[in-house]
Each structure stands twice: as C-alpha cells, then as structure tokens.
Image: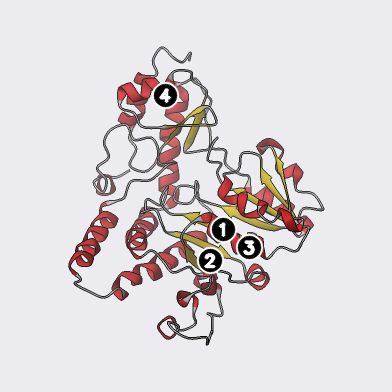
Amino acid sequence: MSSEFAELWEPQPGWLNTASYGLPPKPAWEALQAVLGDWRVGATSWEPWDESTTRARAAFARLVGAEVADVFVGSTVSAAVAPIAAGLPDGARVLVDDIEFTSNVYPWMVHADRGVEVVAAGTDKFVEAIQPGIDVVAVSAVQSASGTVLDLAAVVAACKEIDALLVIDASQALGWLPLTVEGVDALITHTYKWLMSPRGATIGYLSPRLQERCRPLQAGWYAGRNVHGSYYGPQMELAPDARRFDQSPAWFSFVGAAPALELIEQIGVETIHAHNLGLANEFRAGIGLPPGDSAIVSASIPGAEEAFAAAGVRAAVRGGNLRASFHIYSTQADVQLALAALKGLVKT
C-alpha cells in the first residue's frame, strides 16, 4: 500500500480483527465528527446528512456492477433478508452452509410454521448440494468462521441449472474480494467490517425478478416515490424500483459509510485484495499453513488466544479456532508481532 493511503489510518499495532469490525479511514472519521458537531448544537437540518445515503448507494452499485435502481439501504443483513424470506411460497426449501452466519439463516427458519424448510450442507460439499428441489440458496461469499471463499461462479451456474434464487451475504467479502452481482438475485452486505463504516448501514442489491416476488414489508416514508411527500396520511405511493425496500437510514452510519466506500473505489478492490492476501499468506506460512485465497485465517492453535492477549494482538476465536483477519491498514509488522506471540505454540 502506498504511503498516500497508509496515512489515512492510525491503528494501534496488532489489530487483526477486521472480520469483527473495520477501522474507519480518516475521511470517514472526519465526516462523522463534523456531523456529530452539527447535531450537538443543531447547526443544520438532516437533509445534508442524508445525501451520504445517496452517495453510499451509488458507490456500492459501482463496486458490484449493479444499477443504482436495484440497490436498497437498510440497517442489518437479517432485516434485509426478511422480506425475501417472507416472499417465499409455503413449503419452499432453502439451502445454507452448515456454518453460515445466522443473519442469513434465522430469517428463513422463522417461516417453518408454513412449511419453509432450511437444509444445510458442509462447505466442501455445498455446490453438490444445489440439486432440484432447492428453491433458494442462501450463502456467504466468505464464511465468517473459517474464512472460506465461496466458488461463486460454480454456485451461480448450479443455481441457474435448477432456477433457484441465489442470496449472497457479502459482509465478510465486499471491500477486499472482487465481486459482481452477475447471476445473483440478492447481494447484501453490512458495511462495518471490510467496508470500514459505522455499524448501522447495510446496503444490498435485488435483481428485478426478485423485486417482483417480494413485498416491501418494512416500507415507511423513506420508501416513498417522493420521500418528502410521504410523511403523513394513508396515501401510499412507493418507489418503483429497489428503493421501495429501503429502511429509513441511520444518518450518521451512512455519513461514515459514503467516504469509506468511495475510498475503497479510489484504492481499488484488486489492490486491497493483493495487499490482504499477501499478509494473510505471510501469516499462514509462519504458522505452517500452505498459501490460501482468503484475508481471514482460521487455525487451531491451543493457547493462541492467551498468547495474543499477552502480546496486545487483537484477533478473535470462532468455532473454537483462532481467527486473524488482514485488511488494507494491516502491515508486515502486525504479522511479525502475531507470529512472535505464537512462537513455541506452532510447529512450522
């Protein structure tokens, strides 16, 4: 990473936990501080803050190759999946990974009373499990627990073969892994991880065919065709595109999200991808693992959590394994600090 961009973050050494939350770049942090100052004294109305929602929506669309008209905004992944799940016919079958993060599992499972069935397959057998009888495939582009990168092209092809809907949770992928919405019906991401934004801003793509199948159950004034004309009364005219699925945005979360997403565009996802994988694979080599294709490294190292805590390295434990994650602000010094902490615990 060039010094031009490196200076936009000031992380304390040893932050290897972007898979839990990302660190805001300077433009996002400063934008957020400015609006918090305005809020504190009532210096402005809210409309200027809301311009960030428009900017974030457009930046997301560019990042994933979508039309802005097919992009909605919201609060959480589970809330974004809920209208899709509610639109399924009784008795539909949904395939998930058996370690899928539950924001992309529970919204389907709560419809069990009307016969919606959720079935799970292991990560290594997932593509094979996409067989006739499956109506929806709901899966993460990168698994939170293991860091496994989905073979999206193979999943898209398998779903097309049986005409199954494909719903992708991109929360652990978008921002470092190149992704597009080609062949996907929904691609939804929270922005507080690899997109380095405040928690509370979720953005997603809905294919036109999926928009037709879903009811905008969370529609409010912000989903109106004319937002400022939708404040009062029983006259409802919703936006004709994916914006009718908008939830009223958390202004300050999107104020931080817009400059962060635009910075990712400026740096380039391919550049970030190369940087992250370089560090992740340096770490993998140091703990005796072969090279991988993920910015998230999961490994069983007894005693690692305590060793990291003693050394000031912040990572996570998921599924009983150590999980270290590397992003654009991570450095070789972070890798070496982590490996030094693990010295004596791993055999290389």
Sequence-first tag of 2 and 3: 2
SS type, badge 3: helix
Q: Looking at the picture, does residue 219 appear above or below residue 172?
A: below
Q: Give the numbered dot on residue 66.
A: 2
Residue picked out by circle 1 = 187
Q: Residue at x 33, y 30 (%)?
A: 334
Quadrant holding the N terminus? top left
Q: Residues within 10 Å of mark 4 (few under 14, many from 20)?
A: some
Q: Looking at the picture, does residue 243 appear above or below residue 185?
A: below
Q: Quadrant of residue 21?
A: top left
| For discs 1 and 2, the disc positioned in front in the rendered view | 1
Residue 181 visible to an observer of this rendering: no
Q: Quadrant of residue 164?
A: bottom right
SS type, badge 1: strand
Residue picked out by circle 4 = 305
The furthest residue to the right: 132
SS type, badge 4: helix
Look at the numbered discs 1 and 2 and tell me whether their residues touch, using CB distance below 8 Å: yes
**Of residues 116 and 65, the one drawn nearer to the viewer in this rendering:** 116
